[in-house]
Image: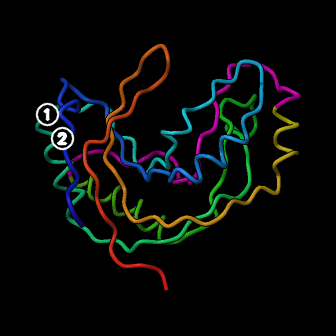
Amino acid sequence: MRWGAFSSHACNDMPRLFVAVKIPQPIQDQLRKLYTPIPTARWVDFGSIHITLKFIGEVSDPQVAGIKTALHTFNTQAFDLFIEGVGTFPKRKPPRVLWVGLHHQPKLLTLQAKVESALGALGFPPEDRPFSPHLTLARLKTEKPLQQVTQFLQDHATLKLSPFHVTEFALIKSVLSPQGARYTDVAHYSLEGTDE
């Protein structure tokens, strides 16, 4: 794996970090076509859409250095992914998150497990729920089911997009604002090899 450039904007006190796979622009463009006017929905910035592998949270500058080193200590093969299906979280309550799913890919699960293990060695606790690969499309503020959400799920139930090749993952800084989260790459890590 190789190091990516460290952004000078990622040095603020107590940065809020996460690890993710970024989505290539051609897939971003296809996902933009899913936009649907839904009351209370705040759609993501499709240019920043990603698969979260591990949310770390706020950390000190010395911890950032340790995290960067830890994520450099393992190798994982590159792999193909494709988007398949749509859904909402939580499952048994009014929806708060609208998402698209990812076809089962063991190498993605392996990558996430290695990220979790590497950061666990630094004292960052594991997630309290199983890894559920997805891409968040929109966040909803509603106390009751919306017909528009039901219609969206019906309209895109058979969604399947073209495969894309994952060759790296990234450590990313998140800054919250009234306009939504703003992301800055801290470091990139290349994956090894290619699928046959």
Q: How many marks?
A: 2
Magenta residue check for 121: no
Q: CA distance from mark 1 to mark 2?
A: 5 Å
In-image side of 28 versus 161 (left or right) = left
Magenta range? 122-148
Q: Is residue 154 above or below residue 70?
A: above
Q: How would you rate the neighbour count of disc 2 (Cα within 10 Å): few for under 14, some for 14-19, many for 20 or more?
A: many
Q: How would you rate the neighbour count of disc 1 (Cα within 10 Å): few for under 14, some for 14-19, many for 20 or more?
A: some
Instruction: Return the x and y of residue 2 as percentages of the image width and height.
Output: 21, 63
Q: Is residue 14 above or below residue 107?
A: above
Instruction: Determine whether label 1 and label 2 are within 8 Å by CB.
Output: yes
Q: Amino acid at mark 2?
A: Val
Disc sitting over residue 99 in the figure = none
Q: Which residue is mark 2?
A: 64
Instruction: Return the x and y of residue 22 as percentages of the image width and height.
Output: 45, 50
Residue drawn at x 50%, y 67% as measured from the top left: 165
Q: Is residue 149 above or below residue 65?
A: above
Disc sitting over residue 61 in the figure = 1
Residue drawn at x 18%, y 23% as measured from the top left: 13
Residue drawn at x 69%, y 59% as measured from the top left: 161
Magenta residue check for 135: yes
Instruction: Return the x and y of residue 194 as percentages of the image width and height.
Output: 42, 79
Instruction: Return the x and y of residue 191 as percentages of the image width and height.
Output: 34, 68
Q: Amino acid at mark 1?
A: Asp
Give the colouring mode of the picture.
rainbow
Residue sitting farthest toward the top? 178
Residue sitting farthest toward the bottom? 196
In-image side of 28 versus 188 (left or right) = right
Quarter of the rendering occupied by the N terminus: bottom left
**In this orientation, which residue lies closer to the viewer: 45 or 158?**
45
Residue drawn at x 41%, y 28% as measured from the top left: 182
